[in-house]
Image (tube, grey):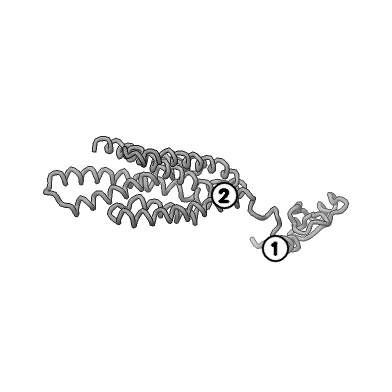
Amino acid sequence: MSEPLFDSAAFYIVNENDLTGEGARGPYSMVEAELILKEEEKIITRQQLAAMRASTPVTAKQKKPAGQAKMQREIRSWGIILFLLGVVSVFANGFANAGWGILLIGVSLASFYFREAPMFVIYGVTISFAAISNFLSGTGGWSAFAFVQVFFAFQTFRQYVQFRAADMADEALPAQSRAGRFFPWAGFGFGVISLAGFVGIIVSAILLALMPENETLSAVVSFSESLIVDMAILGFALGLASLLSRFQHKVFAIIGLGAGLFVLLCEIALSFLA
């Protein structure tokens, strides 16, 4: 069926002082519009309304809320700091022990794409695991520094709570954001891969114990283990961020969180046995 040549419900009512069309009411037929028209109001066509909205300058209302602007500055700062720390870590520890540096660099790069409140959960989980690792190291200086890291982790979770409202003001639904589309699936992927990789590392360690000593293979397994821990941290962090932000695909977020947490707990338990 062809469309009608004339749309009777193609008229809108706006205040005479409304230059943006934000307060437009309609659509109405011309008869309906004339019946409900009030003083200081006028009737415009759909084409006129579209032209008004297209030519509207950016107003204070359309600008990003102050809270969101502050949040994005904080995320940018975290991204720069973590990138520098990651690069220093890679060069200081060498590529064979670069797992932690690679994680920091990866999280820092994500900061420039996912400029949303859930990133603070990623920061908090990453710093928390660093604090746990330093505390379990048994070294006096690093154990003391772990308390500083706990403080920063607590602050990042506070920032998440603070800035989540800014995200909600900018996004109609959390699942429509970049993080909402990506985090649950990424958490699932990282978590499941880390779990499978952890099983592979256990098998590899058993085989190495039965073989003649080989430093190259031992270094490869050690490096692979550090990457698996990185993926476990990301699986747990992304899953937790998805659940706290009430993103869709909660089942996948839970699986990623659970798998990542299991691998991390196993790593902590093995550190006591080592």
Is the N terminus in the top left, top right, bottom left or bottom right quadrant? bottom right
Badge 2 crowding class, 10 Å Cα cut-off, few under 14, some 14 to 19, many 20 or more, is many
User: Going by the picture, which residue comes out furthest to the front?
Assistant: 141
Q: Counting residues from the N terminus, which is met first, the one under dot 1 or under dot 2?
A: 1
Q: Position of residue 18 (x, y in %)?
A: 79, 56
Say what amino acid the circle numbered 2 marks.
Answer: Met
Front-lying residue, 31 or 130? 130
Position of residue 210 measured from the top left corner of the image (x, y, whole percent): 12, 44
**Vertical position of residue 257 compared to residue 2: above or below:** above
Give me the C-alpha separation between circle 1 and circle 2. Answer: 29 Å
User: Which one is nearer the viewer's eye here, 218 or 204?
Assistant: 218
Q: Horizontally, is 232 left or right of 35 in the view?
A: left
Q: What residue appears at the point 71 percent right and 60 percent down from the top-left corner?
A: 53
Q: Is residue 262 visible?
A: no
- Give x and y (percent) for residue 66: 64, 50
Please say whether residue 163 is visible from this viewpoint: yes
Which label number is shown at residue 54?
A: 1
User: Extreme right residue here?
Assistant: 39
Outermost residue toward the left in this view? 212
Q: Secondary structure at mark 1?
A: helix
Q: Residue at x 42, y 44 (%)?
A: 127
In the picture, the disc for residue 222 is: none
Q: Secondary structure at mark 2?
A: helix
Residue 160 in the image: state x and y as whole percent.
53, 43
Count of labels shown?
2
Q: Say which residue appears at 45% left-offset and 46% top-offset.
A: 184
Which residue is denoted by mark 2 in the rendering? 71
